[in-house]
Amino acid sequence: MSEVTLKIGEVARRTGLSVRTLRHYDELGLLVPSERTCGEHRLYSSGDFRRLLAVQHLKSLGLSLAEVRAALDDPGFDAAEALAGHITAVEHRLAAEQELLTRLRNVQGAAETGWEEVLTLIALTARLSHREPTVRLRAALDAPTSAPLSLLVENLTVEADPGVQGILAWAIVQHGPDAVPFVTEHLADEDPLVRVQMSFVLAKLADPRAVPALVPLLDDPDPEVASTAAFALGRVGGPDALSALICRLGLGSGTGGEVLGDAIARFGDQAIGPLTGALRSGTRDVREHAAAVLGFIGSAEAAPALATALADADAGVRLAALVALGHLSGQMADDAIGAATSSDDPRVRTLAARLTADRTPPPAARTR
């Protein structure tokens, strides 16, 4: 039984392709019919039909007709390389479409008042993206009352000039609490510089709603991001921010540890209770760091806990507690420092003697 063949019109009806397209495929050698009638009419076999389906499937992936023919006929055709190229092209198109979508959303609000406002906003957008920093800076100065928050934040994520960055941050802060969700959205950006910038903006906004988004950054692998998050949490304040900072005592060293300590110290007397708790029961590094931060705060309320820490099993903690007591005023701090002059630890004993001398007024001052 001979194989059933289909004329070009029937193939067109079954596939939804035009006759013209099928003739074009034939001319390209992409789909050459297996047979022809005496009148040169094309006849397509079931094998031709299967090849046509393969052509359509490969076209649906974005391959050109030349690539489709190579994929079907060239044994050396690299499918992985071809698909990788198309993936890159699609990603670029998606990025361009996303950029367009962002621009449309940015001008949507202005469209409610008329095309004049739309054109004004488009002009401002162009100035914010100008290659000259001075033009971008002037545009940012004009932006607080005329640019949507999303536009300002997006521009800050790509701005490289420090001066323009500062003005954009200022413009964002002028929007107050409304800016928080727009800024926190970028705290997960893959660029650590963006995470730093957004943390600084949140520090200036000082809105408690930013705390849950800032806390994870305390463990960021980039030290500058972690330090900036600590700085921001110190500026924002609140019990959740303080608790998160206290939990990181002893984890930072150098500049990171100092920034963390400064952030906790901003809470003042609110931090004394958690710090004295850490001084009593934390690890060695935690106890030493807690003692140092109590010294930064300088409250006489910390004197009892610091005096107790002078008997700590670790020499570093004892020394940190003594240094902290040196920043405190009051009789209890004086007594603890005086008692430390008889310590078995030579470093503590030496420092206590020096602190006692510094805290004791000269004879003339005592008799006056």
Image (cartoon, rainbow, N blue to C red):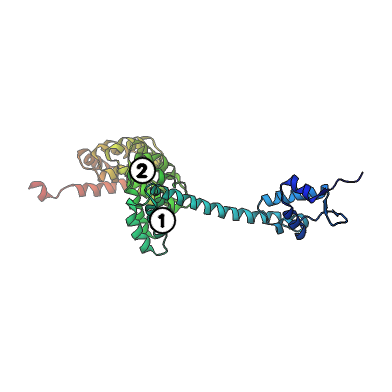
Q: Which mark is residue 280?
A: none
Give the crowd class for mark 2: few <14, some 14-19, many >=20 residues within 10 Å. Answer: few
Give the residue at the far left of this rendering: 368
| Residue 320 on image: x %, y % | 33, 45
| Residue 107 on image: x %, y % | 42, 50
Give the residue at the far front of this rendering: 39
Which dot, 1 or 2, sits closer to the camera? 1
> How far is disc 1 from disc 2 in space, using C-alphas?
22 Å
Q: Which mark is residue 178?
A: 2
Choose the circle earlier in sequence order: 1 or 2. Answer: 1
Residue at 12% x, 49% y: name it. Answer: 363
Q: 84 or 277, which lies in front?
A: 84
Residue at 35% x, 56% y: name it. Answer: 140
Residue 359 at least partly seen: yes
| Residue 282 on image: x %, y % | 39, 37
Q: Which residue is mark 1?
A: 122
Q: Secondary structure at mark 1?
A: helix
- Type of amino acid at the residue the image marks with label 1: Ile
| Residue 98 on image: x %, y % | 51, 50
Q: 108 or 131, which lies in front?
A: 108
Residue 252 at least partly seen: no
Residue at 26% x, 46% y: name it. Answer: 352
Query: In screen coordinates, is 17 left or right of 188?
Result: right
Q: 292 or 362, which lies in front?
A: 292
